[in-house]
Image (cartoon, rainbow, N blue to C red):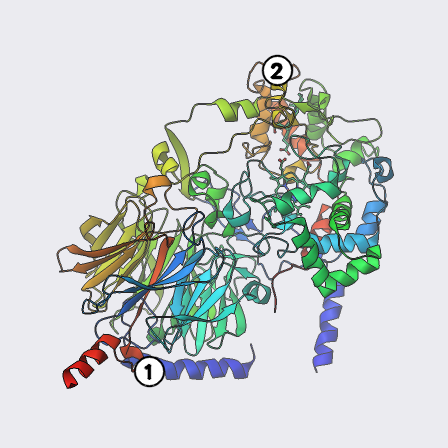
């Protein structure tokens, strides 16, 4: 990158940090660069995998009305089919929150939805289908808003479909900018290999702008994430192909600084919100541990396993996690037993599980509101990793959290409605875009008469 | 300034010695992963660069230890045709959803097979029931596939191109049309064949690329056919004795007077297939979660998230003759050190496991080949045999892999 453009990035990044400091995200796991929803969310957008033999068999964005005062509360108010089974997986808003970028881990297509013109009815604004040709990276996973940019983590590459991969940076307009390869032994790219591993794998990304720090985790390549889960467990060669690292990056220069050993596929990263809390959590899917990345007294970043999740020898498979906005709680879903587990993380070095509940035969994603009072869950992990036959429950479930227990408010059965497999959730609201809720507008007119 | 930089770049490219850099193994090395003290030794993807080889010359020249190509009644090799085949081979757009090329399963640095799992997976992650064979020296196989169901390379290409679990193109015509519409390909086809792409010449092009992947002149060849007495060490020479003597491996993996393909082109029942179809499902399986971390997992847990494995009856599936149950083609053993995992189902992860299997006499069953019997090999003899199998790697494999690294990878672009 030229000096000028890196300066430019620094400038833009800095100016956005200031905006970020003033605003909070609605749900607790998103980029601090993003605008927030005031109060109650109106919609949850569910990025849904098409299933062979079910409905129209293709991936779609499903919009569910979640506002209790809406006449459509609890209902699917829109579905938008995008064509193909792309291995729909994760999605993320642009920093201005007007667009939702959603990726397909198989076809590498990126669907950019307009969610601001009519939050109840997102439209397909643009499809990026040359992601691989531009970057050499396969499996666009996390879409993380930076200043004017979208940072996209990859899971694989187009050379061997293995786990070595990169982060790919796009402009908000959807133009490719640059590829940031994860450090490997052959090319550490200036990073320090702090332990035994530098595998070059990737998965999630999160930033702590106030510390100029960015963190990535590591999963597995196309071959494994597309493979039948049971077949993979029985294939000792395939089981060797998982990431065992997390990487600390310089946020401004996008240069990797330190590679941490983190055996067993660390997935989602969640950083604390409090300005004095310089730490982030992640969980290892295969070894079932909570890990903490923290800045020590000398300003040096360290990584440490701080708790077990369930009985690791039974492979509970922790998947999505969610930190509360007060940094006191961490929700952890374990896919195999279909449970959500709430950890008290008041002492980040000693997480303690204080609550658990079975959500279904399988569970993956969670999204909670900023105030922590509402939590939504979906079922799907990956098309070929999901449970088979009748255990392949596919749902969206809305709960309220009263501080002691989860109370089920409603369920949308994605199988019965022939929608597909429910994966990642993002919140939408009229208020974000200066729009009035249509039913409230009507009431106004009615009372005016 | 820019011109100077470009000049400098071309000079460094010309001076570089890339061959020594090519690793004949996955760039993401997992050697020693079983142990807790495993350390990574990963290569950089952007540094995976190569230099084009003269494939025509490779196809035409004689290779110590191999028969000449002309004795195999193939189309005479042509540089322009090979070039099309090479482009097609690495083109991921040649599949129903534009993500699978031939090279995603026949990965060059992995012996033109897949080292990283037992049986490759294809379109939308669908499983294949067999291990991918190497394509090095594939032209010498009289029949293709583990069950010998196909006869020529030019015909064979349509199996993966159309298979729903491999590349899943909807029809022959859709592939033909796609290539005709692509101006680059169209020009290449017109120049090479004097006609646009069609079912026949697509097959010919891919066949000619694969035909050019000749790799011999191994240390074994130099010793056995070239008369170089020091090219094999004592242990490897001892291994050759076991291979042709007490182990009677060469009764199926043939070595002729002038050359060696290490196959009799026949099909045999060694018991690998019977074991796979008939064995009782164990209650638990061992699963590795991280370096040095192994757990016993209940089979019930595995089957909740797993599909039932497709059965495989070998040659029987083609002939429907019960005598052909679990018969598979004898694979050639050239470059065998590069092509793990082994056998039609990829069941053995290492050559040591293969040798142990033969040493105990395969898996007994009614149709077991009479040539398979307990061998009583001593530990030294097994070690020697293992060493011998390691001497069969062609001296030019790195050139072919480097050439593959230099080949363009086709992906959807705007």
Q: Quadrant of the C terminus of chain B?
A: bottom right
The image quadrant of residue A304 is bottom left
The image quadrant of residue B72 is top right
Q: Is residue B205 above or below residue B271?
A: below
Q: Label 2 crowding class (10 Å Cα cut-off): few <14, some 14-19, many 20+?
A: some
As helix, strand or loop, the secondary structure at mark 1 comes to helix
From the viewer's perspective, tell me whether residue B262 is left or right of residue A292.
right
**Depth check: A24 or A239 in front?**
A24
Residue A287 in picture, x, y percent from top left? 35, 46
Q: Residue at x 56, y 63 (%)?
A: A132
For the residues beneath circles 1 and 2, the answer to whether they share a chain is no
Residue labelled with disc 1: A19
Nearer to us of marks 1 and 2 is 1
Residue B84 in picture, x, y percent from top left? 75, 55
Residue B259 in picture, x, y percent from top left? 81, 31
Q: Quadrant of the N terminus of chain B?
A: bottom right
Q: Is residue A231 above or below residue A45?
A: above
Residue labelled with disc 2: B373
As helix, strand or loop, the secondary structure at mark 2 comes to loop
The image quadrant of residue B376 is top right
**Depth check: A406 or B399 in front?**
A406
Residue B361 in picture, x, y percent from top left? 58, 18
């Amino acid at each position: 990158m030229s000096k000028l453009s890196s300066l430019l990035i620094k400038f833009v990044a800095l100016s956005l940090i200031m905006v970020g400091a003033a605003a909070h995200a609605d749900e607790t796991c998103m980029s601090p660069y993003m605008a927030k929803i005031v109060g109650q969310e109106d919609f949850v957008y569910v990025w849904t995998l098409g299933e062979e033999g079910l409905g129209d068999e293709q991936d779609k964005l499903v919009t569910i009305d979640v506002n209790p005062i809406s006449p459509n509360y609890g209902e699917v108010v829109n579905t938008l089919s995008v064509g193909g089974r792309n291995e729909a997986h994760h999605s993320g808003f642009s920093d201005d929150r007007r667009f939702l970028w959603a990726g397909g881990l198989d076809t590498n297509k990126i669907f950019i939805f307009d969610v601001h013109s009519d939050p109840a009815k997102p439209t397909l604004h643009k499809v990026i289908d040359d992601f691989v040709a531009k970057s050499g990276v396969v499996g666009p996973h996390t879409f993380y808003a930076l200043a004017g940019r979208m940072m996209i983590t990859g899971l694989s590459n187009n050379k061997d479909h293995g786990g070595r991969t990169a982060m790919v940076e796009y402009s908000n307009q959807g133009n490719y900018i640059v590829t940031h390869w994860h450090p490997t032994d052959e090319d550490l790219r200036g990073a320090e290999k702090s332990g035994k591993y530098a595998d070059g794998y990737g998965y999630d990304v999160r930033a702590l702008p106030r510390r100029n720090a960015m963190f990535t985790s590591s999963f597995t390549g196309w071959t494994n994430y597309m493979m039948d889960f049971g077949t993979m467990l029985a294939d000792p060669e395939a089981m060797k192909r998982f990431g065992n690292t997390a990487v600390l990056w310089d946020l401004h220069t996008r240069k990797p600084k330190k590679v941490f050993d983190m055996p067993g596929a660390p997935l989602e990263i969640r950083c604390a919100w409090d300005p004095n809390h310089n730490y982030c959590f992640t969980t290892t899917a295969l070894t079932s541990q909570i890990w903490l990345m923290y800045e020590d007294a000398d300003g040096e970043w360290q990584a440490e396993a701080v708790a077990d999740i369930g009985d690791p020898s039974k492979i509970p498979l922790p998947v999505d996690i969610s930190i509360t906005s007060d940094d006191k709680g961490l929700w952890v879903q374990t896919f195999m037993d279909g449970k959500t587990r709430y950890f008290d993380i008041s002492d980040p070095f000693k997480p303690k599980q204080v609550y658990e509940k079975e959500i279904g035969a399988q569970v993956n994603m969670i999204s909670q509101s900023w105030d922590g009072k509402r939590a939504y869950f979906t079922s799907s992990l990956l098309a070929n990793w999901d449970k088979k036959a009748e255990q392949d429950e596919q749902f969206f479930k809305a709960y309220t959290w009263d501080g002691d227990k989860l109370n089920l408010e409603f369920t949308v059965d994605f199988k019965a409605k022939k929608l597909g497999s429910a994966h990642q959730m993002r919140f939408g609201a009229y208020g974000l875009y200066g729009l009035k809720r249509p039913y409230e507008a009507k009431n106004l007119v009615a009372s005016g008469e | 300034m820019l011109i100077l930089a470009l000049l400098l770049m071309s000079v460094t490219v010309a001076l570089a010695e890339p061959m020594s850099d090519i690793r004949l193994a996955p760039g993401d090395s997992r050697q020693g992963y079983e142990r807790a003290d495993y350390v990574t030794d990963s290569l950089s993807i952007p540094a995976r660069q190569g230099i084009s080889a003269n494939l025509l010359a490779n196809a035409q020249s004689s290779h110590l230890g191999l028969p000449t190509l002309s004795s195999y009644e193939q189309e005479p090799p042509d540089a322009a045709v090979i070039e099309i085949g090479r482009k097609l081979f690495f083109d991921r757009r040649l599949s129903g959803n534009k993500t699978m090329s031939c090279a995603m399963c026949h990965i060059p640095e992995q012996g033109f097979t897949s080292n990283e799992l037992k049986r490759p997976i294809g379109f939308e992650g669908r499983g294949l029931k067999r291990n991918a064979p190497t394509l090095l020296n594939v032209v010498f196989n009289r029949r293709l596939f583990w069950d010998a169901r196909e006869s020529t390379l030019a015909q064979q290409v349509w199996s993966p191109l159309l298979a729903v679990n491999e590349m899943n193109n909807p029809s022959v015509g859709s592939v033909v049309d796609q290539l005709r519409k692509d101006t680059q390909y169209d020009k290449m086809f017109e120049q090479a064949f004097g006609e646009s792409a069609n079912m026949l010449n697509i097959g010919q092009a891919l066949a000619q690329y694969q035909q050019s992947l000749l790799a011999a002149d191994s240390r074994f060849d130099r010793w056995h056919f070239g008369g170089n007495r020091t090219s094999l060490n004592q242990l490897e020479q001892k291994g050759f004795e076991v291979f042709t003597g007490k182990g009677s491996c060469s009764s199926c993996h043939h070595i002729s007077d002038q050359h060696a393909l290490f196959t009799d082109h026949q099909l045999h029942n060694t018991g690998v297939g019977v074991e796979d179809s008939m064995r009782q499902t164990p209650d638990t399986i061992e699963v590795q979660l991280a370096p040095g971390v192994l757990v016993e997992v209940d089979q019930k847990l595995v089957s909740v998230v797993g599909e039932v494995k497709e059965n495989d009856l070998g040659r029987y599936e083609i002939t429907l003759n019960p005598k052909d149950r679990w018969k598979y083609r004898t694979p050639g053993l050239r470059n065998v050190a590069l092509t793990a995992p082994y056998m039609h189902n990829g069941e053995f992860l290492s050559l040591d496991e293969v040798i142990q299997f033969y040493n105990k006499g395969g898996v007994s069953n009614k149709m077991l080949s009479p040539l398979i019997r307990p061998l009583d090999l001593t530990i030294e003899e097994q070690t020697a045999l293992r060493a011998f199998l390691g001497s069969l790697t062609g001296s030019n494999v790195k050139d072919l892999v480097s050439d593959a690294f230099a080949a363009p990878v086709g992906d959807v672009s705007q």
